[in-house]
Image (cartoon, grey):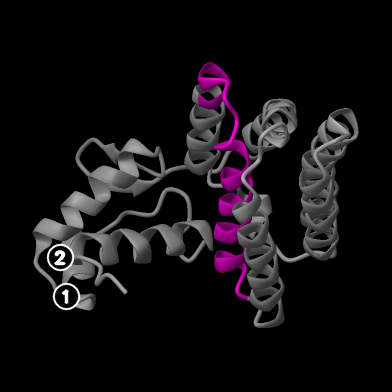
């Protein structure tokens, strides 16, 4: 196992806290405080903050310093719907010559997602879910499509994907749908069904997020 650098550790900790809303939108990030807590100098903290700023998770506010960015839930839902179209087509293209050895890898990743759910480790679940779809899409031979997907993944990360880290019954459904995707990839002879299944898979996640957001908004107003 490769030991992470101080900067990588700070980045991992800060990003997890932002995604899990330990740090609220608009909250100031105090560099010296983080450095003391994580027993490092200010340099790795500043480097990690610059990386998070590039991902639009943090921005610099005049006379204040680094601040946690606001969550834009509408952007999350809209971007996920675009990703549904891009990823589903890339998945169908990948199926034409999908490496057999990667089928086993996908099965292992899906199994690890089940284990993450059992321990309610939603950060790990979210990371594995992203890796699962990345493994599939990277087998696509359309480089321009992959560039679009990569750009959209980066946008999702910047928005923070609030809905993807919240537990709901959707996460269990997602694992079952992954198994169906793996099965169609392994067969490789029904590309249209595979494309439609993958698209619905992403769209259901967007719809689930929108339902929960509406419910939460109603509770807040009530």
Tell me if residue 127 is in the magenta stretch. Answer: yes
Nearer to us in this view, 35 or 192: 192
Residue 65 visible in the shown view:
no
Image side of residue 85 versus residue 3, left or right? right
Q: Are marks 1 and 2 in contact (CB under 8 Å)?
A: yes
Residue at the (72%, 31%) spot, across then down: 96
The magenta span reads 121-146
Where disc 1 sits, the SS reads helix
Identify the image quadrant of the C terminus: bottom right
Q: CA distance from mark 1 to mark 2?
A: 6 Å
**Most common SS among magenta residues:** helix
Residue at the (55%, 65%) spot, across then down: 123
Residue 197: give its label: none
Residue at the (9%, 67%) spot, across then down: 41
Image side of residue 90 versus residue 64, left or right? right
Nearer to us in this view, 117 or 206: 117
Reply above or below: 14 against 52.
Answer: below
Count of number-bearing discs:
2
């Amino acid at each position: 196992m490769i030991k992470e650098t101080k900067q990588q550790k700070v980045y991992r900790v800060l990003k997890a806290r932002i995604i899990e809303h330990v740090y609220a939108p608009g909250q100031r990030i105090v560099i010296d405080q983080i450095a003391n807590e994580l027993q490092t100098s200010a340099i790795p903290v500043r480097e990690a903050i610059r990386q998070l700023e590039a991902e639009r998770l943090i921005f610099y506010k005049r006379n204040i310093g680094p601040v946690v960015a606001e969550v834009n839930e509408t952007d999350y839902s809209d971007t996920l719907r675009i990703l549904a179209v891009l990823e589903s087509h890339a998945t169908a293209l990948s199926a034409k010559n999908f490496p057999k050895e990667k089928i086993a890898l996908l099965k292992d990743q899906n199994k690890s997602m089940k284990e993450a759910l059992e321990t309610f480790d939603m950060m790990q679940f979210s990371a594995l879910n992203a890796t699962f779809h990345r493994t599939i899409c990277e087998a696509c031979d359309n480089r321009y499509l992959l560039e679009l997907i990569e750009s959209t993944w980066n946008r999702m990360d910047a928005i923070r994907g609030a809905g993807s880290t919240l537990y709901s019954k959707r996460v269990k459904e997602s694992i079952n749908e992954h198994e169906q995707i793996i099965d169609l990839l392994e067969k490789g002879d029904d590309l249209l069904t595979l494309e439609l299944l993958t698209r619905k898979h992403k769209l259901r996640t967007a719809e689930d997020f929108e339902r929960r957001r509406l419910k939460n908004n109603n509770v807040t107003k009530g």
